[in-house]
Amino acid sequence: MVSRRYRVVRIVAGCLAAASLTIAGTATLEPYALRTRYARVSLPRTFESIEGTRIAFATDFHVGGPGPSARNTVEAIARIRSWHPHLVLLGGDYFDQGNISETAVFDGLRDLQPVFAVLGNHDYRQGLHNAQRIVGLLAERGVRVLRNECVQVHLPDGGQLEVVALDDPYSGLHDTTLLTRPSNTRPRLLLAHSPSVLEAVPVGSADLGLFGHTHWGQVRLNWSRWLNPLDAAWYLDKIRRKPHARFQRGWFWVRGMLAYVSSGIGQTQLPFRLFAQPEVVLLEFDASGDDPRWPCDHPRRYVQEARSVSPRGTKR
């Protein structure tokens, strides 16, 4: 009997050790596995004028941080450039802890136009003067950083869309009054670093929102789309005494809009990712692509994701 129990204990211990090694290996390798997330999006309000418009979104670069953040940033920009988007949006946290370094990783942005960006909480870690230095560095590469501003984007085929860009909500710098103005004639995109702002925006104030900040938990043992103590990011918010954003990863229907929260490009604090693969996001608008099998308040009605994308944006 003792011998049998001993064998069971050894088997269980061996399985646990193997699982631990597998998880550790995956968490070490996953930061290098940059994915391209491609989706065709049909907005809740139909706008035929933006049919085929391509938007690239990248966020949370954390250059100088642990792991291959700089490598991923260069690769992400290269993938965006090969896709030839009509508009590029950047979601903040360009340097980990705001520590600016002499680097060429953002130089590829010069080949992309137009590029609009917002700042994230890490960009403010070293104070307002340092944040302004980051703004200047991006401006030298043709990027326009928006801080509680609204811009009209004119597309090559004559269509237009509106981008409302809020300053970092995690730092309390956002101004949602920009969203109170009506937007009936053109689609409105909301760009902000943290999805925590979704709790404050007026219902129906935008058609599509793009966010980062969460890293999807970065080390994620929680399979829901909401943060809990099985995510590493849960503890980072606790340490800084910040409330957790309810919307943590993936697509949502919230406040009358589609919203996507990206896992981002780089890492912070830990050189690991687990079930939170880094990504660059490519979106193509499809004016008539909604799926009536899903209810009007479900993102799957409006979003069709593909596993791969060709350089010019054609699904494989």
Image (spheres, rainbow, N blue to C red):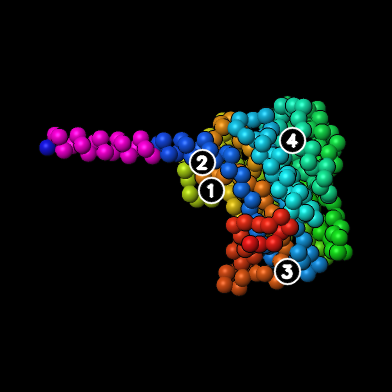
Please name the residue that numbered disc 3 is placed on: 287
* Label 3: how many Cα within 10 Å (few below 14, some 14–19, many 20+): many
Of helix, strand and loop, which one carries label 3?
Answer: loop
Q: Amino acid at mark 3?
A: Ala
Q: Is residue 201 visible?
A: no
N-term-proximal mark, 3 vs 1: 1
Question: The residue tagged with tag 4: helix, strand or loop?
Answer: loop
Label of residue 105 in the image: 4
**Is the residue 270 above or below the residue 217 in the image?**
above
Q: Is residue 192 above or below residue 257?
A: above
Q: Which residues are magenta?
A: 2-19
Residue 43: % across, % down: 70, 64
31 with respect to 61 (left or right): left
Q: CA distance from mark 3 to mark 1?
A: 30 Å
- Give the quadrant of the N terminus: top left
Q: Earlier in the sequence, mark 4 or mark 3?
A: 4
* Residue type, label 1: Trp
Q: How far apart in space, not on screen, are marks 1 and 4 (Cα)?
A: 32 Å
Residue, disc 2: 274
Query: Which three-letter amino acid code belongs to the residue tagged 2?
Result: Leu
Q: Quick one: 112 or 256, which is closer to the camera?
A: 112
The mark lying in front, picked from 2 and 4, is: 4
Can residue 156 be seen at all in this image of the molecule?
yes
Quarter of the picture holding the C terminus = bottom right
Q: Amino acid at mark 4?
A: Val
* Magenta stretch holds residue 3: yes
